[in-house]
Amino acid sequence: VSRLVPKNITISKDLDPALPPVEGDVSQIEQVLMNLIINAKDAMPDGGEISITSRLVEIEQKSLDIPTTIKSGEYVYITVRDTGMGIAEEHLPHIFEPFYTTKEKGKGTGLGLAMVYGIIKEHGGYITVDSRVGHETIFNIYLPTSKRRFFRERSEGAEHITGVETILVIDDEIPILQLIKETLFRSGFNVMVYDNPLHGLDFFRANSKKVDLVITDIVMPSMDGAELIKKLRELDPTTKIIATTGFSEDIGNIWIDGFLKKPFQTSKLLSVIRNVLDRGKGTSNPV
Ligand SMILES: Nc1ncnc2c1ncn2[C@@H]1O[C@H](COP(=O)(O)OP(=O)(O)OP(=O)(O)O)[C@@H](O)[C@H]1O
Ligand SMILES: [Mg+2]
């Protein structure tokens, strides 16, 4: 996110690494954060501070000022705060409306917050704002945590395997993606998942420096995994790659750092990942 803002704006993060997954689309939630960060930047032409926090909260339906459509339960609570110009009282009730903007012509379409609002609502969550002219602005986002428990596996040994690295996962089987995402998320990793290898590749092209590891399926309809691995290597030869497949013959002689045979246990997944990540750069041998 630091790429989005000029040098006179600092971004600080205080994120809970052990948050449970929320149901939904990673790229949409990213769009939400991007929009809020860009708005915050625009509100601080002379620089300032953006801080982002996340934690788990319990919401009681009958409490406070929450919309009546919101159910009681566990929510991931995200705040985006800036030290900018603040929002005037007369604008405040309208900022989430489409085409509502206070920016000069050509600067803003007024669609940013409308989109943010739509995405959060679609995810069963809600968003509020605290702001006054000349004071800080805080956007509060609440997203319901996933209620699906069936992928969770209580295996001894793997629980202590954690990490903070960023992992890109590409697999055309949604349940597998979901399983990997949930497992890695719970262990603290940043996870991006794509069921379409071409989209995964696009993401990697734009973010290769930030991705510490790619986990990819070998047999996928829209793009051959071996071809994908070749392209990933061309974009960044140092990238660590773990391949997954039901058939070890599929691997052939492509250069990978680790291999997971499907079906795999989440404990196995975590141990292979940790192993590959901890192996010194440059010494990674094909497995
Ligand atoms: N962090 C903020 N600080 C001050 N004002 C804000 C902030 N975020 C939003 N606003 C106000 O809300 C209005 C609507 O925001 P929104 O993101 O919907 O549109 P925009 O930023 O004007 O245009 P767009 O996002 O389409 O480029 C803004 O024009 C601005 O007046
Ligand atoms: Mg905006």
Image (cartoon, rainbow, N blue to C red):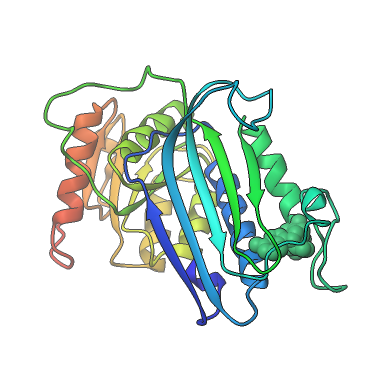
Residue at x 57%, y 43% (from the top left corner): 141
Quadrant of the rendered structure where residue 25 is?
top right
Q: Is residue 160 visible?
A: yes
Q: Is residue 287 visible?
A: no
Quadrant of the rendered structure where residue 158 is?
top left
209 shown above or below 157? below
Q: Position of residue 245 (x, y in %)?
A: 32, 34
State the residue lying farthest toward the top: 150
Residue 115 placement, left or right of 51: right
173 shown above or below 169? above
User: Closest to the observer: 122 or 170?
Assistant: 122
Residue 259 placement, left or right of 280: right
121 shown above or below 87? above
Residue at x 51%, y 66% (from the top left corner): 50
71 shown above or below 20? above
User: Closest to the observer: 11 or 34?
Assistant: 11
Q: Position of residue 174 (x, y in %)?
A: 48, 30
Q: Position of residue 208 (x, y in %)?
A: 41, 64
User: Closest to the observer: 147 or 281?
Assistant: 147
Residue at x 54%, y 21% (from the top left corner): 72
